[in-house]
Amino acid sequence: MLHAAVQALFLVLEPMRLLIMAGGVLLGLSLGVIPGLGGVVGLAILIPFTYSMDGPSSFALLLGMASVTTVSDLIPAVLFGVPGTVGAAATVMDGHALAKKGQAAQAFGAGYAASLIGGIFGAVLLAVAIPVLRPVALHLASPELLSFCIFGLSMVAVLSGRAPLKGLTAAGLGLMLAMIGADSQTGTQRWTFDTFYLWDHLPLVPLTLGIFAVPELADLAVRRAPIAAGAGGTISIAGQWQGFREAVRHWKLVLRCSALGAMLGAVPGVGSAVIDWIAYGHAVRTEKNPETFGQGDIRGVIAAEASNNAKEGGHLLPTIAFGVPAGASMALLLSAFLMHGFVPGPEMLTKHLDITYSIMWTLTLAHVLGAGICLCASGIFSRLATVRPGILVPLVLSVVLLGAYEGSQSSGDLIALVLFGAVGWVMKRLGWPRPPLILGYVIGGLFERYLFISTQIFGAGWVLRPIVLGVLALSIWVAFRPLRISVIDTVATLRGLRPGHRRMGPRPLFSLGLLAVTACGYWLSRDWPAAANMVPQAAMLVTATFGLLNLVTELFGSAAEEAAESAPAHPPEFDLLASVPTALAQQRALRFFAVLVGFLFASAAIGLLPSLFLMILVLTRFEFHEKWSASLATSTIAITILYGLFDRLFSVPWPQSALGDLLPGMRAMTGVV
């Protein structure tokens, strides 16, 4: 194992790989500054660009980016009172108060030091746990891995917060989406609608970009106004070093909160939105003079940031060792593992041990590099949070569209992106948790494969293996309490019905739509062979059962119950649309998605790159009302950079358009139509 660790260090320290990791760190720091564009969005954007990379290089890029978004999200939390990611919500309590006192630099220094120590603590935990988990993993066969998949699905109830019925319905829908394509056992075409694009399953990249990235961009487009302006005092190096020394002075608090964050991060379903608040509450309960917390106490920043960064190493433990994602970002990272041929589980702790240790080294170096860059460039990064949405949204959206297309280089990717983007935005607005859908999709393929192998080798006896029984019991225990409460509430709602007691609105209509999709799926699958239909039927049963229970609550429950369940997981003041009237938000969102639909038609007519130019111009000039000079400059510069990057550097084959068919000479000359 020592040999594998040393070999992994040399892998990571190769100059080109270090350069790739540094690029990922810079991108992650930039995304962390912009509220809504955190590690999940970054992973969704970057994964398609790792297709041509080797495993260590791709993980250097992905982990370099994902691990430091929780470092720079401190900047908007302190300066503007708006967390860059939901994991920085607790940081706002004291960080923004310090900025109001003119002590933003001290808050930055303390936060960066706590982030650095917490990140290294999480990486060390990962390294120390590997020797312990390795002999355990050697005794795992397909039944045990199948039980871990079931455990991962059971965590959906925890991932869903106050809306377990919605979360389980979304997970069932994700399982259904995972079943699209040709069944590997029987060759049956499942829900492909005679479309060649879907034969090899629905691609993950446009799905994840649509569910996570597009809704955040839509929210920024709807809100319109800059996130905030102004800063809390001068961001000096000396002031940051003073904060750094404060973190060192409170080293016991840093270590306690780092340990707390790492251990909680290793529990699937306990996400960023919970961990930093638990650590903050721990600091309030255990530190002297707790009455100063919330009024600009540096210890509040230290506690929240240490736990927020330590959780990354903890998140990787169940993902690498057992293939159970600890959250949405780990679900995406799990898909990257599978894409590069690395199956989480025993192989990652034996055959690919050097890759596992390279992940640990990457995590450590990325945090050191990220903290160092932030100390030197906080003032520069803070300006990203004030970029006008009229410039920011079209530029990021164009990268998202090209990232989706890069997935399988098919026009179907763009259609899927827009479709799931609209679904994701509606889910977000109606209080539906989105991570369970991706979790269901990612685990769905693994679940079906392990189920087939287990039943073929062990028959029904796979359920009676000791580890399987233990994991299944744990899964039932995890899911029991939230499900019990939800079912009891639903039964109580039905018993208390009065004549005419019904409330129709957008939430019940959306639930009815999901049930209609499930019913159509069942009708289309009625003639499939039993071997090809076993998992799809289970997915439809889950979706229909919990979807119906949720519909009952939405139709007949009290308005207070519905509001509590559908409320966002973070406080209302962190919702970008809290200040926008509902009718106006709907109009702006409708225009935003109308532009995307127009882009799809334009892309089919005149080509992808020319359509991107028009889309950026339309959004900047007519939707955000930027000046003609700024709009034309933004569109021209963006397309020039994208053309050089994707056409000249990556040699992306652009989709053919009607204009290119009509004028083949233009296609031969430009290559983009």
Image (cartoon, rainbow, N blue to C red):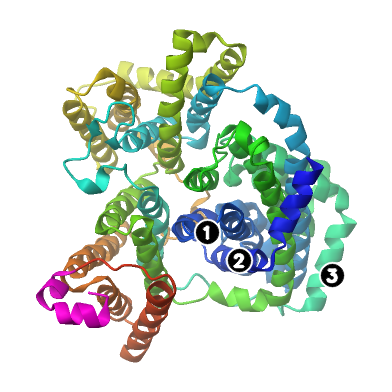
Q: Is residue 259 above or below residue 668?
A: above
What residue would you read off at disc 1?
53
**Labelled pair 1, 3 in contact (Cβ < 8 Å):** no
**Tag nearer the camera, 2 or 1:** 1
What residue would you read off at disc 3?
242
Sort mark 3 into few (<14), some (14-19) or many (20+) by Cα contacts within 10 Å.
Answer: some
Residue 202: give its label.
Answer: none
Of labels 2 and 1, earlier in sequence is 2
Q: Which residues are magenta?
A: 657-673
The x and y percentages for residue 329 are: 53, 48
Sort mark 2 into few (<14), some (14-19) or many (20+) by Cα contacts within 10 Å.
Answer: some
228 falls in the magenta region: no
Q: Quadrant of residue 185?
A: top left
Q: Secondary structure at mark 1?
A: loop
**Tag nearer the camera, 2 or 3:** 2
**Camera sees residue 440:** yes
Q: Amino acid at mark 1?
A: Met
As measured in the structure, the alpha-carbon distance from the residue carrying label 2 to the one carrying label 1 is 10 Å
* Residue depicted at 57% across the width and 13% down the height: 469
Q: Is residue 179 above or below residue 529?
A: below
The x and y percentages for residue 65 are: 59, 60
What residue would you read off at disc 2?
20
**Labelled pair 2, 1 in contact (Cβ < 8 Å):** yes
Q: Amino acid at mark 2?
A: Ile
**Camera sees residue 305:** no
Q: Is residue 529 left or right of residue 573?
A: left
Of labels 2 and 3, earlier in sequence is 2
Q: Is residue 119 left or right of residue 414?
A: right
Q: Quadrant of residue 615?
A: bottom left
Q: Nearer the viewer, residue 459 or 74?
A: 459
Q: Is residue 553 above or below residue 307?
A: above
